[in-house]
Amino acid sequence: MNDDYGLTVDTSVESSGVDGRSLTPENFSAAVESITASFGDPTRREIYWRIRESEAGLTASEVATTMGLHNNVARHHLDKLAAAGHVVVDIHRESKAGRPSKRYRSAKAEIEFEFPARHDDLLGTLLGRALALLPNDEAEGLAEEVGHEYGLHLAAEMAPGEAHRSLQSAVATVAETLTSHGFAARSEGSAGQLRIVSEHCPFGQAAIDHPVLCAIDRGLVRGMLAGLHGETAPQLAGSLAMGHSACTTLV
């Protein structure tokens, strides 16, 4: 079947394999992981679709402008698509002294997938249950530290050796990055009263059943802000697990 992005998806798994191989649990898992890694994120799917529609391809700056993203967030998605072989990169240098520019264009007219991507919160549930074995304070501290370390990693990928000059700019970038990872987040407020509001949690029901997982989100925000701006102390003011309609993190 064809999805909204023109990708051909074969949902039959009875006799088909991966790259001509017979179907096994191992290559089935590999196919699903490959599809999810490349197109499981809605922002990345939209970027890929825009590139498909552009004969000349697009630069990271053009993608960022048309989609309202930070340049580094757009570049992160484009590089992931390029690494997976879904887009190719043309490098142009205007002059010997000028910095080369990258233009991304679709690698193929059509991409065929053997298996559909599937989402569930099994890993979140298992993580929540593992953390539940620890004392609450220890579990929350561990969860936040895991999020913090990964947040630092994301910040380093987005802006290696670069820091935002203002907290407000950094918070906006963090919200965009969270959205690219399934949080549907946005930044609100002004200097002195900034917040990140997330209307969707990628942990799903697992976060409601195990609220300690919210500490991972707080750690993600703290880690990314540390890498993009400096140390902060984000506080969770509301969450889906608390019964609110969105998760709100005060910065």
Image (spheres, rainbow, N blue to C red):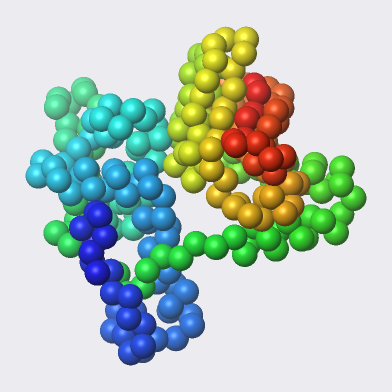
Q: Is residue 218 left or right of residue 165?
A: right
Question: Percent position (x, y) of residue 209?
Answer: 72, 54
Which quadrant, please, contains the N terminus?
bottom left
Q: Residue at x 9, y 44 (%)?
A: 55
Q: Residue furthest left?
A: 55
Q: Residue at x 49, y 29 (%)?
A: 186
Placement of 32 over or under 52, stated as above or below: below
Which quadrant, please, contains the C terminus?
top right
Placement of 160 over or under 117, stated as above or below: above
Question: Percent position (x, y) of residue 97?
Answer: 21, 22
Question: Percent position (x, y) of residue 9?
Answer: 28, 69
Q: Residue at x 18, y 49 (%)?
A: 52
Residue 216 appears in which quarter of the rendering? Answer: top right
Residue 79 makes an appearance in the image: no
Q: Residue at x 55, y 63 (%)?
A: 120
Q: Nearer the viewer, residue 132 or 107?
A: 132
Residue 236 makes an appearance in the image: yes
Q: Is residue 155 left or right of residue 126?
A: left
Question: Percent position (x, y) of residue 181?
Answer: 49, 45
Q: Is residue 39 left or right of residue 95?
A: right
Q: Residue furthest right?
A: 135
How many numbered discs sit on the rendered protein?
0
